[in-house]
Amino acid sequence: MGFYIRKAISVGPFRFNLSKSSVGVSAGVKGLRFGTGPRGNYVHMGRGGLYYRRTLPSGSTEINQQSHTPTLQQSDTEIEHDPLKEIESAHITQMVDSSSAALVAEMNDKIKKIRIWPFIGTIGTFLTFVAFQNSETPIVAFIIAVITIALTIFASVKDSLRKTTVLFFELEPEIEALYQKLHDSFGQLSSSSSKWHVEAEGSVKDRKRNAGATSVIKRTSISLGLGNPPYVKSNVSVPFIPVGKQTLYFFPDKVLIFEPNGVGAVSYQNLRVFVENTRFIEHGSLPRDAKVVDRTWKYVNKRGGPDKRFKDNLELPIVLYEDLSFTSDTGLNERIEISKVGFGGDFSRAINMLSKGI
């Protein structure tokens, strides 16, 4: 999965251009633009370090791939189990380190800004309706409608400029190659037939009546992709993973965590990624790339065979899935599961190499 680095970004009528030393912004019509000096957030990454308005400190990285004997899991069906324990991150305001504080503060400030175009549009529509009902000449209502449309468009552009954060990245060749490896490994994750966000996990009380499973999980199907967060413009394509109400965006210098009302950040130096295989009793449709490693039954006896007291005792496949857990000291705690084994390790190694290269 290749990624691209654009030299210019358009935000409304403004165009941000990447130069050798900074970011310039211009405004005007096509072919006639007036420069207004450096703007935007400029990030330079290379052997000399990472620069975002200042030099960022380095830290320790812990990325681990585990290969111990997998536990036996199944989905949260109508079975008897202990209360599920939520797998969730801390509040978004806690997930920020010193290297990201300025950027996160700027983004959160812009997220809180209220959009004004809906109010203008609503008031203008109401005035147009009143004028049309009370005026003997429709031209008055028409003029109000035209003014309303113009003001609404202007307000919409103004809102976009007020709420949008521009991130311009200049990557030296060695950093670009490392970020390409992250993209390539992310493409492998995305190619898995099925991906899930694991929301909660609990222990099984009666293994005999629950296909021999030791734990149950609650999971939701997700889709991985490339794109920018809401109200963020960047000159690079960014891999993202949705994890419930939050979405993880893997930028070249850090992971930005977005939710509807806030933004957090975790540097790659402070990110921990754990990869492990999981044996899963699959009750639903079998993903086409899943590896079946064993069989069990809906109800098992003490020896692990089928319990013949139950007539509807279906045989179920046990498949091998791969889990990736993302954690940090600042409270990140998310877990996903993919149907294809062997891709998670490449992704964790790519993050490890990127963290060491910054």
Image (cartoon, rainbow, N blue to C red):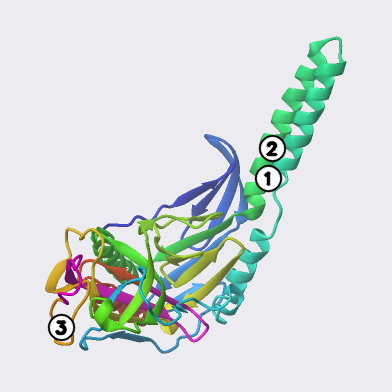
Instruction: Determine the residue positioned at 86% across, 10% down.
Output: 136
Task: Inspect the image, locate mark 3, and give the three-letter code of the amino acid beneath it.
Answer: Gly
Residue 137 occupies which quadrant of the picture?
Answer: top right
Q: Secondary structure at mark 1?
A: helix
- Using residue 81 as the reference point, say whether residue 265 is left or right of it: right
Q: Which residues are magenta?
A: 307-335
Q: Which residue is mark 2?
A: 154
Label 1 vs 3, first from the N-terminus: 1
Q: Secondary structure at mark 2?
A: helix
Distance from label 2 to label 3 (Cα)?
Answer: 69 Å
**Callouts 1 and 3 close, C-beta under 8 Å:** no
Relative height, residue 115 to residue 89 (above, below): above
Q: Which residue is mark 1?
A: 158
Q: Secondary structure at mark 3?
A: loop
**Callouts 1 and 2 close, C-beta under 8 Å:** yes
Label 2 vs 3, first from the N-terminus: 2
**Callouts 2 and 3 close, C-beta under 8 Å:** no
- Using residue 168 as the reference point, say whether residue 194 is left or right of it: left
Q: Which of the two residues, 281 or 42, is positioned nearer the viewer here?
A: 281
Mark 1 or 3: the one toward you: 3
Relative height, residue 143 to residue 136 (above, below): below
Q: Position of residue 234 (x, y in %)?
A: 48, 56
Task: Inspect the image, locate mark 1, and give the three-letter code of the amino acid beneath it.
Answer: Lys
Instruction: Determine the residue positioned at 50% across, 77% down.
Output: 89
- Quick check: is 320 in the magenta stretch? yes
- Using residue 305 as the reference point, say whether residue 92 is left or right of it: right
Quarter occupied by the N terminus: bottom left
Residue 195 occupies which quadrant of the picture?
Answer: bottom left
Residue 201 occupies which quadrant of the picture?
Answer: bottom left
Tell me, yes or no, if residue 358 can be seen here.
Answer: no
Q: Position of residue 34 (x, y in %)?
A: 61, 43
Q: Residue 304, which numbered label?
A: 3
